[in-house]
Each structure stands twice: as structure tokens, then as C-alpha cells.
Image (tube, rainbow, N blue to C red):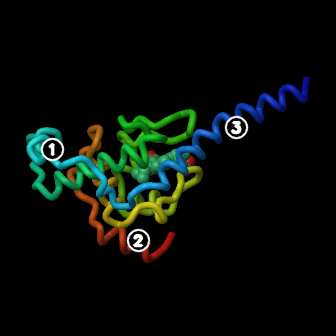
């Protein structure tokens, strides 16, 4: 009886670990700055992102749209496209997250260097790519921070180290 219980625990644990490992491989193996995205349509992007109290310029809209596709390929496997997270994987929701909406420096550090079972992205995302993803995360799903993460800030934190 004891042995059976034990092996059940192992199987259950494997079921949690294998999807995370598959995701890690998938997320580590693509273009670091997200230039492999669909064609940018400024008109569509303006409709998506502009609100009564925030009008983004074309460069900013392109960053948000690029960030969205990068987020889809690198982060949504664990955090979900709607930013709601996954209890199976233990990935918290980024929608409404105090970290996503808090200090930009801490947010950058979390994703560059990882945290707990959250993988580090310093090897697989460059400064521009990470700045785009985080700009998206700070504004998607009603996070509404109305700011763009600066590439130079990501570069500085990367250089300073974890
Ligand atoms: C393999 C699964 C996985 C992937 C892929 C992943 N994360 Fe995470 N993420 C996690 C886990 C698990 C945690 C919780 C870490 C902990 O327990 O400290 C987390 C935590 C976070 C947090 C802290 C949230 C909070 O409110 O505490 C942020 C921000 C974050 N991730 C952003 C991202 C971004 C941006 C990406 C894509 C570049 C990404 N994550 C990709 C699993 C993942």
C-alpha cells in the first residue's frame, strides 16, 4: 500500500514537471527580439490600445503589438494568453499582478534572472525583446500602466546582474 501511494506521488509529480520542461525548451528556442512577428497594422493597433485617457504614438503601438506576439510565444504557455496564470504550473496571474504593475526595475529583474520556478530569460531574450514583452504585460488585460519599458533600463539591469 505504501509503495503504491509513493509511486502515485511520483507519477503526479512527473505530470507537473514534464509540461514545464517542454515549455522551457519551446520558450528558449526562438528569436530573441521578436522580429519574427506578423505585419504591424498601425490602424488596428490604435483601435486596440488607444483609450480616452491614453493615445499611443506609432512607435509605442508597434512595441505593444510586438510585445503581444512575443508574450504569446514565450510567456503564455505558463501565464496564459489572458494573463490569468496556471495553478497546475504554479504561475501566478499577470493580469492585475502587483509585480507586473509595480516597480519596472523589479519586474525586469524577475524576468531576466528568474524567480523560484519561474525561468530566467537573460539567455533567450535580448534587451529590446524583453522591453517589448514587459511593455505589453504592463498594459494588457487592464493592467493599464500607460508606460513603455525602456530598452536602456533592461540593458542596465542586465549589466548590473541579478
Ligand atoms: C515555465 C513556466 C513559465 C514561463 C514560460 C514564464 N513564467 Fe513567469 N512565472 C512562472 C512561475 C512558476 C512564477 C512564480 C515564481 C515564484 O514562485 O516565485 C512566475 C512569476 C512571474 C512573475 C511574478 C508575478 C507576481 O505577481 O508575483 C512575473 C512578472 C512573470 N512571471 C513574468 C513572466 C514573463 C514576462 C514571461 C515571459 C517572458 C514568463 N513569466 C514566462 C512560470 C513561468
Give residue 76's position: percent from left, percent from top.
Answer: 42, 41
Residue 157 numbered tag: 2
* Mark in front: 1 vs 2: 1
Q: Is residue 80 above or below residue 28?
A: above
Which residue shows up at 83% across the image and 27% down it?
5
The image quarter in which residue 35 lies? bottom left
User: Marks 1/2: CA distance?
Assistant: 29 Å
Q: Tell me the SS state at disc 3.
A: helix
- Say if mark 3 contacts mark 2, CB within 8 Å: no
Give residue 49's position: percent from left, percent from top.
Answer: 17, 43
Q: Is residue 9 left or right of residue 54?
A: right
Q: Tell me the SS state at disc 2.
A: helix
* In front of the other: 96 or 112: 112
Q: Is residue 138 left or right of residue 78?
A: left
- Which residue lies under the disc numbered 3? 14
User: Marks 3/1: CA distance?
Assistant: 41 Å
* In front of the other: 154 or 45: 45
Quick check: is the Cβ at mark 1 less than 8 Å away from ligand 1?
no
Q: Tell me the SS state at disc 1.
A: helix
Which residue shows up at 37% across the image and 74% down it?
156
- Which residue lies under the disc numbered 1? 45
User: Marks 3/2: CA distance?
Assistant: 35 Å
* Mark in front: 3 vs 2: 3
Amino acid at each position: 500500500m505504501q509503495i503504491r501511494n509513493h509511486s502515485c506521488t511520483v507519477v503526479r509529480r512527473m505530470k507537473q514537471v514534464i509540461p514545464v520542461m517542454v515549455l522551457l525548451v519551446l520558450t528558449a528556442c526562438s528569436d530573441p527580439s521578436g522580429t519574427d512577428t506578423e505585419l504591424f497594422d498601425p490602424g488596428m493597433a490604435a483601435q486596440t490600445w488607444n483609450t480616452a485617457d491614453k493615445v499611443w504614438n506609432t512607435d509605442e503601438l508597434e512595441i505593444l503589438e510586438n510585445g503581444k506576439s512575443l508574450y504569446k510565444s514565450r510567456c503564455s504557455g505558463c501565464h496564459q494568453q489572458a494573463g490569468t496564470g496556471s495553478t497546475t504550473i504554479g504561475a501566478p496571474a499577470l493580469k492585475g499582478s502587483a509585480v507586473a504593475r509595480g516597480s519596472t526595475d523589479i519586474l525586469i529583474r524577475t524576468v531576466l534572472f528568474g524567480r523560484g520556478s519561474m525561468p530566467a530569460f537573460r539567455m533567450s531574450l535580448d534587451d529590446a525583446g524583453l522591453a517589448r514583452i514587459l511593455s505589453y504585460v504592463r498594459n494588457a488585460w487592464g493592467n493599464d500602466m500607460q508606460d513603455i519599458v525602456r530598452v536602456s533600463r533592461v540593458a542596465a539591469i542586465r549589466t548590473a546582474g541579478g
